[in-house]
Amino acid sequence: MARRLQFSRLATVSIITAVLGLIITIIFALNGHGYWSLAWGSVISSVLRTALLCSLSPFFPQRWQRGVGTLKLLRFGASLTGANILNFINRNLDSVLIGRFCGTELLGLYDRAYKMLLWPTSNIRDPIMRVAFPAMSRLQGQPAELRDYFLKGCALIAFLSMPLVAFLGVTAAPVVELALGTKQDWSGVVPIFSVLAFIAFLQPVTGFVGNLLIALGQGRRYFYFNLMGTVTNCVTFPIGVYFGGPLGLAVAYVIGANVTYYPRLVYGFRKTPVRFSDFARAWLLPAGLSLVSAAVAFPIVRLLGGHHILVQISASGLVFALGCGVPFYMKYRVFIKSVLSKLAARCFSRGREPC
């Protein structure tokens, strides 16, 4: 259904199964099943999701046949599986090292900082990627159109994620206090949060390159693209933990990623319609606006350090709204007006039920 761009059906299935999974979890919990309620809720929700997707999808598995390209698909799938394993290592190696050598308390601080940055950027990037991937797959035989579509997607992700990450990095202390409260001492989260912002600044955009490689069917290149990053992390993470604990690992993460971004991206774009220079130009404007806004907001937040955290966050947010929000609207105003007009027509047009 994703390939057919039937995202409304996928969203409906996700909402239904999420609600049913929650209800099932509550029922099991009320009947005294304890933590098993979460497990059974997840299992039953997954079964229901699979059943609904199979009932709504026109695809139905058939008997195995020769000469239909199955071996080629298996090779491509093996490359993707290997890349996913590497991604799993990338996402968990830092936590394993910190938990092993620094203890659970410092692991908790690092985990909070990492997830607070990952959650907003993931919720910006992932929906765009889910929509963009099937569209780029359809444009495999049209290099110019695929290149333009990919670069527009990069620019959109950059305009949405980079100002947000820069804002969070500048206002790290008040944001952490607002999100986690003051009942416990979360001050150790702030420096880790600020350093990891340097990683989260470019990561949503560079992650979009993987979608391009998969859409072009270049599974092996995608695997080696991820392998380069994994090898770098396997070298830098232990060094960072040894010399500086969680904060040292975060610094090593930033250094290793920024040193290898260029060779990884040059390799990734080889044999694709996109050049590295095109890719860099796509996010140069939002990156520049975000950095300038951060440079203006940082001393303002420092000057307002004695005021309430909402005052600090609001002042910084105003700077980013003027520095990044206004240019974003000017660049995408036609698209924004089109979306708003379609929503208004859908909600208030005659003969249709209101939203």
Image (cartoon, helix red, strand yellow):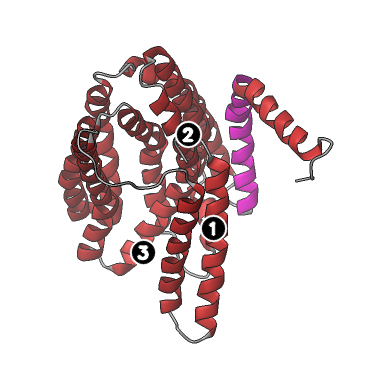
What's the residue type where badge 3 is placed? Gly
Residue denoted by label 1: 179
Residue at 55 percent of width and 36 percent of height = 297
Which circle's residue, 2 or 1, is located before the other in the chain? 2
Q: Position of residue 307 (x, y in %)?
A: 63, 52
Q: Position of residue 54 (x, y in %)?
A: 45, 52
Report crowding for label 3: few under 14, some 14 to 19, many 20 or more residues within 10 A (C-alpha): some
- From this viewpoint, is residue 213 visible? yes
Front-lying residue, 52 or 154: 52
Badge number at residue 307: none
Question: Can you say whether 340 is above or below 199 in the image?
Answer: above
Report crowding for label 2: few under 14, some 14 to 19, many 20 or more residues within 10 A (C-alpha): many
The secondary structure type at the circle numbered 2 is: helix
> Contact (CB < 8 A) between labels 3 and 1?
no
Residue at 17 percent of width and 49 percent of height = 239
Question: Can you say whether 62 is above or below 133 in the image?
Answer: below
Residue at 77 percent of width and 40 percent of height = 347
Span highlighted in magenta in the image: 309-331
Residue denoted by label 3: 108
The secondary structure type at the circle numbered 3 is: helix
Report crowding for label 1: few under 14, some 14 to 19, many 20 or more residues within 10 A (C-alpha): few
Q: Position of residue 157 (x, y in %)?
A: 48, 32
